[in-house]
Every structure is written in C-alpha cells, then in structure tokens.
Amino acid sequence: MSKVIDVGVWYREDTGSLSERQSEEGFRAAIATLDCLFDFIFRFFIMNLIILFSNAGLADWRFRASLGAVLFCAICGCEARYAGSDGSASLEVWAVRTDEERPVAGVEVRALLSSGKELVSRYTGPDGQARWEYAEGDLVVRIEDPEGRYYPQERVVRNPRKPVFFKMREGVSSTLEIRSAGRLPGPGGGVGEGGGRSPSSGSAAPKTGPTLAIQAQVEAWPLDGAVIRSATGPDGRVTLAPLPLGDVKLLVSAEGHVRTVLDFTLTSSENALGRIVLQPGGATLKGSFQAGEPPTDFSFRFRGVSVKVAASADGSFEITGLPAGRGTLICLRERRELFRLPVDVRGRVLDLGEIDPELVAFRQ
C-alpha cells in the first residue's frame, strides 16, 4: 500500500491566513458529510426496491443478503470519502515568509525515508504544489531555498495527516578563519604566522606562537533548522550562509586536531567571527556491537552537537578527535536508535570493547 504526499506551498491570491485555510477545510468536510448522507439515502432506496420486487420477508435469505450488501456498501462508500480511510494520506508543507505570511516560490522540498535514502526532490511551482507517492513509514522533510535567501530547515513527519508549517526566515552570513596551534609543515616546508583566540566553549587554549591555516570542516547547528556544512579553503577561511539570526553552535573538525564546539550569537546580516585556533590531538573512541540487528551508524553527542560515523561490516566503529569530557554514544540502524550509552572520554584512546546489549537501554 502506498501513500500520497502533497507537499508544497499553500497559496491564495486573496489571503494567506491560516484561519481561512482551516475554514476552507471545514467546508470541504461538511460537503463530504452531506455527500455521504445522500449516498446512504440512495442506497437505502435501492434496498427497499429490492425488498419490494423480491416480495421477501425478513427471514428470507435473499433479503438478508441484500441488506448486508447494502450496509457494507454504505459504510465503505462513506469511509472512502475521508482522507486516510483507504490507507492513503495527504501531507501538506506550508512555507511562508514570517514578515508577510505569503508563499515562497521556487523552494526545494526533499523527502527522506527513515533509512536515510532520499525519496524525491521537487521544487514548488507557482501554485506551491508537489505530489508524489511514498512507501509507508516516517519521513524527514527538508526545505531549502536554492537562491540562498532563507536558511534550510527540516522536520521529522510521523503523522502525514497533519500539515507541516515552515516559517521561512532570511538568512545571514558568517565568516571565520581556522588555524592550527601546532607547527605543521606548509607549502615548501614553511610555517604560517598569526595570532589566535580560544573558542567560547573553552576547548582550546589561547595561542600566541606561530600557527598555520588548515583545511577543516565546519558544521552549523541552529536551534531551529537543519545542520549546515561547509569546508575551509586552502587559506583556512570559510563563509557559512545562510544561517539564522540568534544563537548557533559551530562544530569545527580537522584531521589530527581536537573537535571544537563554539557558541555564537549572530546579530547582523554579515558576521565576522574572527580566528579560531585548533589544538592538535584529541581522543579516539572505539568499540563494537554485534548483538541483534547489525548497526549502520554510530553517533557521539556532546555539547549540543554530534559526530556520526558509519559502522564497519563487523559492527565496530572508531571516532577520532574527541575532546575530554562526558557524552552519549548512540547506536543506529538506518536512522532508528538501537541504544544509547553514556561515555566519559578520558586519555588518548578509550576502547569500549564489545558492548554488552544487556548493559545498555534498547529503544525498539
């Protein structure tokens, strides 16, 4: 059985209010109820004609068969007029500007299955509608503006009969420079020069000696929205856009360095976040899990962010560059959480060995 998704931006020329949309839905429901009532009356009339022409009593088998058939058709005929009665459902995604409450055209809507596989990607048309069928199950709906005007957002959809409402907010940009505190050889064997500062999380100490621009991966974790990823260029600089105004977390990762979490508050359309100096080193967390279903991924959550790695064929994993401190290890199979385990990261290598399923809390 397949379901039907109706994803897009709801649009009306004369109004964009949610209350009028709800009134319209109520009117449609009333029409469907009246249609069902008239259909039942018609079927009841047909049933009486059958009784009249068969000249049968209540005990006659033909009457009982006719009565059962008519009642069955009446019930099924009424239920078929309601969304979801035949196993189908209609999912609506509304995307409007927060300042005008009017639709945003040309927005990309992506649907991902619980396994992480992308189901479909469509762009909203002039009427803001997009339809496709999908296999039954939870969905992750991500909405993104290809023109970069609004920052991306995503939601987990568990009930396709309820609309998903996205408020599109204009994004801002942020620039920063990533450097290494270690003396790493640069082009021609040279070493970069420059000052530095520690991130607000305190995971890196101030550095006043020679530093080198390095290539790093930067992830932005807005409080409301999807994770935004980018990478530095050869000069160690990176620009992140679009990001939402307000509080945001940045996770900076580079090979051979401690993963660093930074907290910023973005207040303007262009935000210069300065220079970040990463410290060489970092702890390695590893282990394996083989009981029950084989895992597909492992995620380690700390300080409001997470690092995700793919599991090996034998169920083992290894996560590098972790800072010292407490976090949570989460075992996943196609986005479904199998278990979570609190971990206190200490030393250079923390080997959990083969994790005992009886010592962790399963989440089926």
Image: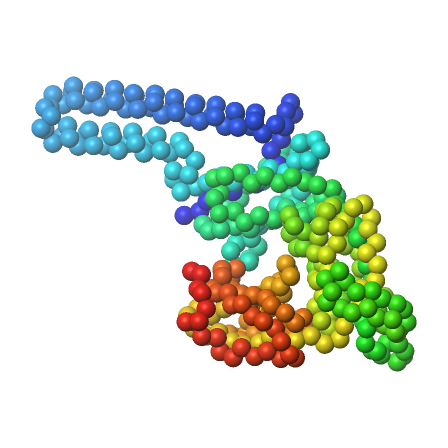
Residue at 17% in and 32% down? 65
Q: Is residue 233 left or right of residue 355?
A: right
Quarter of the image for residue 268 reads top right
Would residue 292 be seen by someone viewing this image from the given angle?
yes
Residue drawn at (63%, 24%) of the image: 15
Residue 132 in the image: above or below residue 185: above
295 or 122, nearer to the observer: 295
Image location of residue 133, percent across then percent down: 50, 45
The residue at the point 41 percent across, 33 percent down is: 82
- In the rendered view, tell whether residue 39 sits above or below residue 137: above
Give the colour scheme of this rendering. Answer: rainbow
Q: Viewed as shown, does residue 63 lie left or right of 9?
A: left
Is residue 293 shown above or below 150?
below
At x 60% / y 68%, what residue is drawn?
A: 326
Q: Position of residue 27 (x, y in %)?
A: 48, 23
Towards the viewer: 11 or 50: 11
Displayed quadrant of residue 343: bottom right
Q: Position of residue 361 (x, y in %)?
A: 45, 65
Q: Can residue 236 be seen in this view?
A: no
- Which quarter of the rendered picture does the C terminus lie within? bottom left
Up the image or down, 354 lies above or below 196; here it is below
- Residue 120: where, in percent of width, then height? 57, 50
Q: Relative to the observer, which residue lies in front, 60 or 334?
A: 334
The mark tally for this picture is 0
